[in-house]
Image (cartoon, coloured by chain):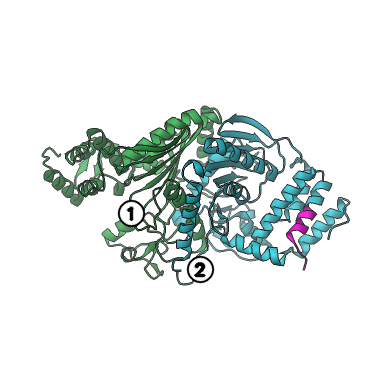
Chain colours: A green, B cyan
Amino acid sequence: MPIFSASQLIDVGTKIFLAAGAPLEEARLVSEFLVKANLAGHDSHGIIRVIQYVNDIEKGIIKPGANIEIVNETPSTAILNGNWGFGQVVAKRAMDLAIEKAKGNAISVVCVYNCNHIGRLADYAVMASENDMIGVVMANSTKIVAPFGGRERMLSTGPICFAFPSYLEFPLVIDIATSVVAEGKVRVALHKGEKIPLGWIIDKDGNPSSNPKDLYDGGAILPLGGDEHGHKGFGLGLAIEILSGILTGAGCAYEETKRGNGVFIEVINVERFMPVEEFKRRVGDLVKVIKGSKTRPGFKEILIPGEPEYLTEKVRLRDGIYVPEKTWEEIVNLAKKLGLSQIP
Amino acid sequence: MPIFSASQLIDVGTKIFLAAGAPLEEARLVSEFLVKANLAGHDSHGIIRVIQYVNDIEKGIIKPGANIEIVNETPSTAILNGNWGFGQVVAKRAMDLAIEKAKGNAISVVCVYNCNHIGRLADYAVMASENDMIGVVMANSTKIVAPFGGRERMLSTGPICFAFPSYLEFPLVIDIATSVVAEGKVRVALHKGEKIPLGWIIDKDGNPSSNPKDLYDGGAILPLGGDEHGHKGFGLGLAIEILSGILTGAGCAYEETKRGNGVFIEVINVERFMPVEEFKRRVGDLVKVIKGSKTRPGFKEILIPGEPEYLTEKVRLRDGIYVPEKTWEEIVNLAKKLGLSQIP
């Protein structure tokens, strides 16, 4: 059972991306973002992606070293053309720019198009909260979610993320898909040969299904809220689609040519509204009161958004990151193919 | 069965608020907002509220004619102290200011505190979309929602609203509570003596309940997403609480002194990102593709956010607005008490 430290995996990823033609800085940055996902417990967005990314580089989908262009700019806004570089490189650049603009202008919006898969939104939003600002990130992607009452794929899973500065031990970060579940969860069940709960997906005829295979046979994921309240998840997903797909120029999920992520980033500079210290203290107070309130029967504790990932990270920094045999074998084979020998 | 035209009800409301001491402009504006809610089919936020508002004026909770102060301002942001004027008057002023600021600065944020109940968020968000801008409104209020896994009231229902300009026949506006349901729906069931579906509320011990009375006996509403995905509604509710309760200075739902609405308003000026015509066309295309896609078994059509309210408004503009006998009686008695005779 292969277990590695975060730095070992970052090193492996960096070497592979370098060998695949990426500039060193990009190779390292993308690897760091992938391993951050492993540390947070989101292995589907972790080191396993080097395989796909190298494949995408070979196909010309990802263009390492692409020039990121600012095509439209005001003191508080910008639109970035990622020119199909690594999603992580483009999104990090976009958030850096949004933070700079919010310093001078209290709030900022940066939109991104021609951008590959950026991974977990939380990683960018916390860049803002680490700078005592509020980070908001939304993204769209290819279609997989049905509208409320519909049977056809029309929207992406419509993730939205908020990160807030505070004095809490863990980063307070809300990072959720506005569909019932992210696609990765259905895929995991498929690979394990397990059923999924009714209410996650419909089959191609619009009937509820507990067979994950039905999603990939023309089915769709349902919007958050289920049969009774799915108009809420649908509404949120639609808003996120418009902001990250239309306002950015990245294109909508329903369009056949759609690929990659459209990304909408917003930063709010807290100190333009109130003393940062006071904001952070009040956020912490709110969270502590909630955390300390009574649980429902069946719940051991109230977990705060960002807390489970933080707890997992602590364990994995101590005990290492487990990579499934098969995944590791594929990574080693890929490394060999690229002429690398010094993989752990 | 008393049925009235919108203009009759606006007239009644205006006269009553005038007689209760409100300046004419405020009396008319608040009445218009209330009757807009009736037209949209949201009677719980409609003309029935004149009774409560006059009561609130008498108690000094609502201060008609209050001076709305800008206590903190940058070119793109402001914080408004509503000084406990009518919520509608304060929120409209805040949205007007946000629209002005977004004209000059591409994006704007206006925060509001010391503000009474503002009614439906949609009414303010569409002020932005009618100006070819994107309107976002969030609000907090007193506590009634449990955190995911918790049994105590900690958050408000955390409504969030987005309005987008388009060429559609109806205003595209998403206006949802991030709890499973708004409190009004539970109250309606209570008044009708009906059960509610399991999954809406828990009783004071944290157990699921279908008895609406349990909410008012120390129970709580659940966050959107239910037992399996309630962390999503909880996360969204927490983000909305921080933005509309902490950043605004309005105070958090959990605080014992909390009253009224904290309001977070954001406006994005579309033309600073892309030609408005193109944005509106693309939004319309997206909606039309979704609207025209196949329905699931059991659904007659796919309804778009904002569409049901628009359809109801068309009917009520034609057929009038029905006010329940008992409500009308109370309104007439209130008018008499205030010395008015010319009520229809």
Kind of residue at disc 1: Gly
Image quarter of residue B86: top right
- Classify A256 as above or below A324: below
Q: Which mark is drawn over residue B301?
A: 2
Q: Which mark is drawn over residue A112?
A: none
In the picture, measured across the screen, residue B183 lies left or right of residue A61, that is right
In the picture, measured across the screen, residue B62 lies left or right of residue A20, that is right
Q: Position of residue A9 (x, y in %)?
A: 22, 39
Q: Measuring 39% from the left and 33% from the top, which residue is drawn there?
A: A96
Q: Secondary structure at mark 2?
A: loop
Residue of label 1: A184
Q: Secondary structure at mark 1?
A: helix
In the picture, measured across the screen, residue B212 lies left or right of residue A45, that is right
Q: How many marks?
A: 2
Near-viewer residue (A285 or B75) = B75
Q: Chain of mark 2?
A: B
Residue B259 in sight: no
